[in-house]
Image (spheres, grey):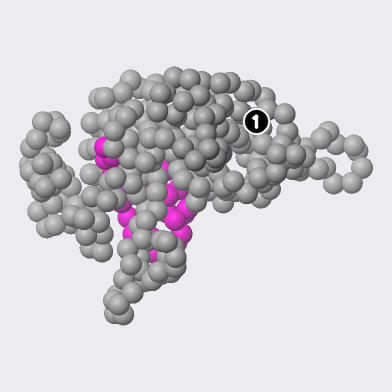
């Protein structure tokens, strides 16, 4: 099986057009220290052959942890959250998700997060590097760890579109009212609490879709031009995805809140479905934990 092959064996399979000697020469594998940037450039070179220049490259960004509680002499251990607080090292990964369905993910960059950085700072740095090297526009999908003002501000100068999951108890604000001419101009309009339907504004768009048999009927609503409190200048489109059919126990499915940030837009019928492809990076993490040993990355 492919998962049992070494890196050098994978490079000579038909999955790659790049030969192993080129990868070894350009990425420094002779001394077992591959150049991450050059390796990423080779990956992107292949990806651009798969998609037209105007089509998005879909990448997933995620943060995981490697528990090292007993490694007392290991430098730069940090407190990480993984089903509780652990002591170890965190890693940030940005991976290309090539298929509309399936679990394949190709990691473009996988780096340890130092104690002087953070998952959001590391992810923003990785996304910026990928965008600088990519000819295609980039769409990044991220979990709720990144669905906040800190991430929105961190990626403000990066030429990428982002689709993030938002916590169900988050708050967003609408555009401020017109300046009355007295006092300080307002920065925020009415507050929208996601866990309090009585505060919800009227949606700008709402559609119902019944195209995925495994999901059933889905209602998708969108609010335009909202913002997080600490990022009033960064406009966010809020998306609510609701499955209309109940679960097997008769209870409704929890709602899925998403936030879109970027200059480009995608049809509401398809944009929310892009987020579901994010889970391909989780399958790669399982492979990495089982065979690659993150503690030596």
Q: Which is more toward the observer, 134 or 98?
A: 98
- Residue at 31% across, 71% down: 68
- Residue at 15% across, 51% down: 28
Q: Which segment is the magenta one?
A: 104-128
Q: Reply yes or no: does residue 119 show up in magenta.
A: yes
Q: Quadrant of residue 65?
A: bottom left
Q: Is residue 84 above or below residue 207?
A: below
Residue bearing the label numbered 1: 223
Quadrant where the N terminus is found in the figure: top left
Q: Is the residue marked by circle 1 packed among few (<14), some (14-19), or many (20+) residues within 10 Å?
A: some
Q: Which is more toward the observer, 60 or 131?
A: 60
Q: Which is more toward the observer, 208 or 36?
A: 208
Q: Quadrant of residue 79?
A: bottom left
Q: Reply yes or no: does residue 195 show up in magenta.
A: no
- Residue at 44% across, 35% down: 275
Residue 206 on image: x %, y %: 62, 23
Helix, strand or loop under label 1: strand
On screen, residue 142 versus residue 236, left or right, reads left
- Residue at 56% across, 51% down: 150
């Amino acid at each position: 099986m492919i998962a049992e092959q070494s890196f050098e064996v994978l490079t000579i399979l038909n999955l790659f057009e790049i030969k192993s000697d080129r990868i070894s020469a350009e990425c420094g594998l002779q001394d077992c220290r591959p150049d991450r940037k050059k390796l990423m450039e080779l990956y992107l070179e292949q990806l651009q052959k798969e998609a037209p220049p105007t089509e998005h490259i879909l990448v997933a960004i995620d943060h995981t942890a490697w528990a090292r509680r007993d490694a007392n002499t290991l430098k730069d251990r940090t407190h990480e959250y993984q089903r509780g607080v652990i002591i170890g090292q965190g890693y940030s990964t940005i991976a290309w998700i090539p298929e509309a369905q399936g679990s394949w993910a190709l990691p473009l960059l996988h780096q340890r997060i130092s104690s002087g950085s953070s998952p959001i700072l590391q992810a923003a740095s990785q996304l910026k590097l990928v965008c600088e090297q990519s000819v295609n526009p980039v769409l990044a999908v991220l979990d709720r760890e990144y669905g906040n003002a800190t991430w929105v501000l961190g990626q403000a100068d990066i030429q990428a579109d982002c689709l993030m999951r938002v916590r169900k108890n988050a708050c967003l604000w609408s555009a401020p009212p017109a300046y009355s001419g007295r006092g300080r101009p307002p920065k925020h309009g009415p507050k929208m609490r996601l866990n309090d339907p009585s505060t919800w504004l009227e949606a700008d768009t709402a559609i119902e879709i019944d195209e995925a048999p495994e999901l059933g009927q889905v209602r998708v609503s969108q609010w335009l031009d909202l913002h997080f409190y600490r990022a009033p200048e960064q406009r966010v489109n809020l998306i609510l995805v609701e499955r209309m059919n109940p679960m097997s126990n008769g209870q409704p499915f929890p709602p899925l809140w998403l936030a879109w940030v970027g200059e480009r837009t995608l049809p509401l019928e398809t944009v929310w479905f892009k987020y579901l492809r994010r889970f391909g990076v989780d399958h790669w993490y399982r492979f990495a934990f089982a065979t690659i040993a993150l503690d030596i990355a």
